[in-house]
């Protein structure tokens, strides 16, 4: 009867809120800590770097090295993540020519496609399943492409720049090869495939570092918000946020379901498509000579609204019995 239906939809809503709310409350804590003077810009920058270089690599290493990669490797899934990302980037880059003025095109494209797959994605999936599930495989399929595409787009669409910078391309290639998260994934795969034993001492030590990734990453993200700037570029920021949180997921989720992806795979795909724009977008845009205002506003908007959109998507998938 409808009573049961109402109960299960309430359960689904609670399930979804349990997955999303702690993530956003942790980010709000970061904002609060900055306001209280416990974190300043310098500390947050170091924290971001620590999470990127040490904690997330430890986390992905821990998760991958403890599973049988030969059994859980899924080439089709990695390929799907890669192709969905590639198509998204290409279409957004074409749309940007029609939708936004030249000055901010590069920022607009990057902010529209580049998810915080690593920090938010892993936090999200861990929150639901207790381990990072398929997130590492999704990261293999997307993060190298995210980074490479970002450099190409930010150099090609730089105000007043018409040709690709070779030095920059080499730097990108090096950046991808030496990306700590990707190195952590590779080390984990190697460990798993070669079945190298892990003594308990090592396991516990790695776990101590890994467990810091999500809370510290989220707090650093929260602490780096700037509200005043966000209002300056509202229209393109809202547009980029809509693409990031709603459009990509609406296009590719049905496709993923048709291909038979459910549970952890589908959650990883949802995170890839519909999670907030990553903070590293801002770092990269600034480093490559863009203003960064559009990017930071989009990070802020998507982070805030993904509390609702991700809950909505998750609620929908849960109600349809797909996760």
Image: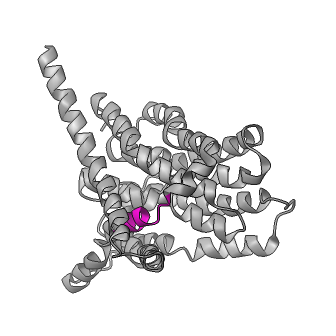
| Percent of width and height locating residue 142 | 54, 56
Q: Is residue 169 magenta?
A: no
Q: Is residue 221 magenta?
A: yes
Q: Quadrant of the C terminus?
A: top left
For this view, does 93 lie left or right of residue 51? right
The structure residue drawn at horizontal position 40% and vertical position 62%, both measured from the top left corner, is 222
90 vs 54: above or below = above
Stretch of the chain drawn in magenta = 216-226
Front residue of 33/276: it is 33
* Residue 132 image offset from top left, x and y in percent: 32, 59
- Residue 71 visible at all: no
Give the residue drawn at x 79%, y 49%. Answer: 102
User: Which quadrant, please, contains the N terminus?
Assistant: top left
Question: Is 80 located above or below residue 158 in the figure?
Answer: above
Q: Is residue 18 left or right of residue 99?
A: left
Residue sitting farthest toward the top: 1
């Amino acid at each position: 009867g409808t009573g049961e239906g109402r109960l299960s939809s309430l359960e689904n809503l609670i399930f979804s809120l349990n997955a999303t709310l702690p993530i956003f409350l942790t980010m709000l804590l970061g904002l609060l800590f900055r306001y209280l003077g416990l974190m300043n810009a310098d500390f947050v920058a170091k924290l971001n770097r620590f999470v990127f270089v040490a904690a997330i690599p430890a986390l992905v290493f821990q998760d991958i090295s403890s599973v049988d990669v030969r059994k859980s490797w899924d080439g089709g899934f990695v390929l799907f993540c890669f192709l969905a990302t590639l198509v998204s980037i290409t279409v957004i880059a074409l749309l940007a020519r029609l939708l936004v003025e030249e000055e901010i095109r590069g920022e607009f494209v990057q902010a529209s496609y580049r998810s915080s797959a690593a920090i938010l994605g892993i936090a999200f999936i861990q929150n639901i399943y207790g381990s990072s599930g398929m997130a590492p495989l999704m990261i293999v399929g997307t993060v190298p492409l995210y980074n490479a595409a970002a450099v190409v787009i930010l150099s090609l669409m730089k105000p007043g720049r018409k040709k690709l910078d070779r030095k920059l391309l080499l730097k990108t290639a090096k950046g991808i090869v030496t990306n700590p998260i990707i190195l952590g994934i590779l080390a984990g795969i190697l460990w798993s495939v070669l079945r190298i034993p892990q003594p308990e001492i090592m396991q516990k030590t790695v776990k101590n570092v890994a467990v810091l990734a999500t809370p510290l990453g989220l707090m650093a993200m929260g602490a780096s918000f700037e509200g005043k700037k966000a209002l300056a570029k509202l229209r393109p920021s809202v547009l980029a946020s809509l693409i990031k949180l709603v459009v990509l997921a609406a296009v590719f989720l049905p496709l993923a379901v048709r291909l038979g992806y459910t549970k952890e795979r589908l959650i990883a795909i949802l995170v890839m498509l519909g999670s907030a724009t990553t903070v590293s977008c801002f770092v990269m845009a600034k480093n490559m000579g863009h203003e960064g205002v559009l990017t930071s506003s989009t990070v802020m908007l998507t982070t805030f609204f993904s509390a609702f959109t991700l809950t909505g998507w998750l609620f929908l998938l849960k109600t349809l019995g797909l996760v």
